[in-house]
Amino acid sequence: MSKYSSNDQKFIRDLTDLILSKLEDENFGVKELVLASAMSHYKLSERVQAITNRTISQFIRETRLQKAFEILQNEDITAAEVAYKVGFRSPAYFNKCFHEFFGYPPGKVSIGESANFREINSLQITTNQVQIKPLRSTNILVLSVILVPVILVFLIYIIVLKNFSSNAGNSVKKPDKSLAVLPFKNLGDTITNQYFLDGVMEEMLSNLSRIHDLRVISRTSVEQFRESKVSVTEIAKKLNVDYVVEGSGQKYGNIFRLRVQLIDASNDRHIWAESYEKVINEIKDIFSIQSQIAQAIASELKARITPEEKQLIDKTPTLSLSAYDFYRRGKEELMRYGFSDINRESVERAEALFHAALEYDSAYAQAYAGLATVSWKKYYLEKYSLTYLDSMLIFSDIALSYDDKLTEAFNVRAGYYDIKGNNRKVVEECNKAIRYDPNDWNSYWSKGVIYEDLDLVQSFENLEKAASLNHGPQFIPLLTRIGYDYYQAGFPEKGNEYLREVLKLDMDSVKYLDKLIRYEAETQGDYKKAIAYFTKRSLPDSANPSILLYLGYFNAFDCNYKESLKYYNKYFSLLKSYEPSNPWTGQMMEYLIGYTYLQNGYRKEAYYYFDKQIKTYNDRLKYPLRLGEKIYFIYPLAGVYASKGDNRNVYKSLNIFNQYKCIYLVWLTSLKNDPVFSSIRNEPEFQQIVRDVEAKYQAEHERVKKWLEEQGKP
């Protein structure tokens, strides 16, 4: 008799069917399976582990691998194509997993071949029974399964090789079918030509971005090569892509000519090229060419286009040439200053151009989305004006009423809910955007930032995906953020990999060392090393306010209060000409500045900064705050109350702090070492909070560690 009941067998079959129904969805993971199964994460994990001795993540991955083997048995198809069919975003990672599981690479599977499974502690599940096979090897911990044709029942395979070998390499992996569309060359002599060609290039890039089977680098990534003389091979290397699209053309009157070519960057070989000449009688004449080009390139790369993707690519967003022209001009104004820089004059010009577009087509969804983006930028220009916050939602909703698949509108809605502090809605809107544009780096970035508060594994997955899609001005901030988050998760070696990548890009060794020393001190508590380093840094750069603040901060944590105050006073002498742009260097440190004054006997000055810290907190509360943002204000507030000896409010603040789910190492290190808490450090209530915080940090650290191992990352 089998110890596994028919209910267990049915449970496994039902879970397998859920995974197979979402097979091509690379984002269908543990969280999605938990939701689809209508069980809690804990209960699902417990039952899968009890029946199969597998985690949910292993269960999903091995189901995909088994299906991959079946496809290779029955279809004449490449391993890379199979990888995407079964939900692996990277063919290289798919090949690695397949080889480890079956003992040979997917390229060795022949049509009609049967799997030659070894009988090593394998759990075999059939429609009639569940049997346990005896262990025949003690040296290799590889688990295998038996193929059940007809019902495609999932069978459990592998734990891990005894001597696990991880793949070293770049932090950002690249799959096959990755490409960049370079800015088109203007063969005409007017600015109108340039607007037109930029519009054709961006629309074509947008069409390609909608294809899940492709990885398409963002436009902000390629703008740096607009006037560049760098070779295609070198551009592809910098952008981490396999193919490059080049184009050139001109427009005179209502006739335009265009030549587009697809280049294999590995050998600078032109693998496809086409010339187009078209008389523009209707706006659809432009969009039809853009659609044809995108589909021709996808076909050349053997990228599968789903019916929904084809419908999006073929869509004509407006029937008015004038509306389209005004919209394109407005879009270019918003692009002029990049992702994060906001220029008032440019924003106002864009707003006027979008309104002009709507005069010619009052149902032009993209123009409304443009106005929503303008409102988003004006929200910050006008110092968090609620009027513009409301306009963000109103304009994006109007846009979606005319086009319910418009990625840009979903992006603005995500921004709106981010400002409102609604994490769940941010993720929902980003997921909608990604559904219709799987190469929308901005949505992955937004999700990655949100998940920093909730789930570091998902944060890393989304931030790394964003970095794989954007190698423009945002690439260095992306890599820096990922590196810092690895430090915060307790993986300094991994974090330094990303910092070294940044060093290769900006060649700024001083900035690299500043970050390295600062991150180490914040997360590991080596304040003396930081003091020694920044003291040397201050000698040739004594007027650098950030260095002065670091020295004030780290000396205070090392209880060198006279030295700390000396550097704070030097910093204040520079304030007339300097305002800190990073909150860490200013408002988040007011409590510590006050405490330093107090330790030096300056009570009046100390309470001035304590009051400022409380005001900073109260002012920020006027605007919505996510819990993850709130911690940056609650912790200093607790520091103020501890300095004043107000223990009731200290614990009130620290208990709010303790609600935070993803505790970063910097908070744990600070809580253990911050001198402002020295008077209560031995109290049972404070020690319990420290234990709670440490347990949360350790739990998240272990989750990230397990994820890194599963991903084959060193």
Image (cartoon, rainbow, N blue to C red):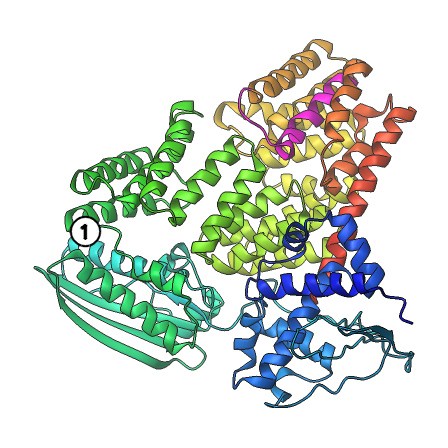
Q: Residue at x 68, y 41 (%)?
A: 534
Position in image of residue 672 (x %, y %): 83, 34
Evaluate whether residue 38 shows in this view.
yes
Position in image of residue 106 (x %, y %): 63, 82
Against 341, residue 639 (above or below) is: above
Nearest the viewer among 390 and 54 is 54
Q: Which image quarter holds the N terminus?
A: bottom right
Against 75, residue 283 (above or below) is: above
User: On the picture, is 180 further left or further right than 462?
Assistant: left
* SS at badge 1: loop
Evaluate whether residue 709 shows in this view.
no
Label 1 sits on residue: 319
Outermost top residue = 604
Q: How dense is the environment of label 1, judged by Cα within 10 Å: few (below 14), some, or many (20 and up)?
A: some
Nearest the viewer among 50 and 605 is 50
Outermost left residue = 253
Stretch of the chain drawn in magenta: 622-642
User: On the picture, is 189 further left or further right than 24?
Assistant: left
Q: Residue at x 81, y 46 (%)?
A: 698
Residue 625, magenta (yes or no)? yes
Residue 94, magenta (yes or no)? no
User: On the picture, is 45 further left or further right than 584?
Assistant: right
Q: Main secondary structure of the magenta part?
A: helix
Position in image of residue 230 (x %, y %): 37, 69
Nearest the viewer among 72 and 624 is 72
